[in-house]
Image: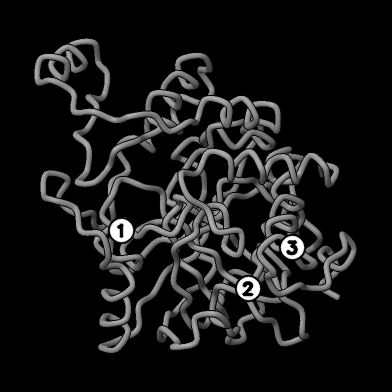
Amino acid sequence: MVDKSTAKRLVDEMISNLPKHNRQQRPVHTIGVGVDAYFTASDVARKFCIAEHFSGERICAKVRFSNASGGPEQHDGWNDVRGMATRFLLPSGAATDLIATTLREFFARNVEDFFEFTKLDKHKPYRRESPWRKILDMLQLKIPRRDPYPGEETNASAGILNYANRHRFAQLGVAEFKKIGAPVSYARAAYHAIHTFIVEGENEVRRPVRFSWQPVAGVGNTNPDAPPVDDYLRQELEGRLQRWPARFVLMMTIGEAGDAIDDPTRPWPARRVRIVMGTLTLTGVPEDQATAGEQISFNPLRLVRGIEPSADPILHARRDAYEVSREMRGGTACPFSHRSCADGE
């Protein structure tokens, strides 16, 4: 947990890097769409986690998909991280959130790293790289800089690469971001909750875990060589859900001794045991988007009994930074104390 002044500084630093910002909107993941959904746990989920939403009952849910960039401009076809924030509305009256993105690893280990990142994450004029420069980059085993998108005059790539060059721990996340692309649909991307949580299962067995959403329709990206389209993701999702529901499977990866528990920049080995915890079914895009997504204040530490946070400093910093952001934009408040999050009151 960070103090409120530090949390406010985190939010202010993010806003200062945006070319445009409306203080009534989220500073990042500004453009998004709210979706109605429900979640049904798998038959084995309760064995591994006693949290209420894994009881096997059908759980109502609200989902907000988003583009990571801040500001009011719609650039669906640009290379960008996508977000999937899910609120489970529990039968007891409590709620719990799971926040995930298409980025599998983060680029900062703690608040100090993040502040350094924001100092370098500055927009500067972005120009086309010559073909010879691209060839030289490939010979040096570097990812060639992509050409500017139509209308893209500034970009923060140079500062982000400078940050990654200074810090080995950031290189995996930054390299993944550079080639992440654009999904053909919000329903055809995989989303990862990059932090570790501690879950309690049967007989009070506790395990470190990481969660991810896997699309049943499969992962699909747009053609990176085709001209990007600015606005298609909401329309595509509306059309898809008018024809039939879309589904995600919630996967839970169980950590083992030696795995990074408190560091979101470090991946776990691919051979770790994964458990199918349930299925999320998307049913429709409501007309009232204010209620469906924009006014909901998601928070990664809105937890219920059976799931606890690890000591990951970035995870704890996000709790208060999200609350500062909510206050700034007038988002709907949720009764929120550490005890209520832990106990589901």
Distance between mark 1 and mark 2 Cα atoms: 22 Å
What residue appears at the point 28 percent right and 46 percent down from the top-left corner?
181
- Circle 2 crowding by C-alpha within 10 Å: few under 14, some 14–19, many from 20: many
Q: Please give left or right for residue 231 compared with residue 300 in the image.
A: left
Pointer 3 residue: 327
**Which residue type carries mark 2?**
Ile
What residue appears at the point 50 percent right and 44 percent down from the top-left corner?
18
Closer to the N terminus: mark 2 or mark 3? Answer: 2
In front: mark 2 or mark 3? 3
**Which residue type carries mark 1?**
Asp
Closer to the N terminus: mark 1 or mark 3? Answer: 1
- In the image, residue 222 sits, relative to residue 290, either above or below, namely above
Residue nearer the viewer, 70 or 222: 70
Distance between mark 2 and mark 3 Cα atoms: 12 Å
The image position of residue 221, as x and y in percent, is 23, 54
What residue appears at the point 69 percent right and 45 percent down from the top-left corner?
315
Residue nearer the viewer, 56 or 320: 320
Closer to the N terminus: mark 1 or mark 2? Answer: 1
- In the image, residue 42 sits, relative to residue 114, either above or below, namely below
What residue appears at the point 22 percent right and 24 percent down from the top-left corner?
144
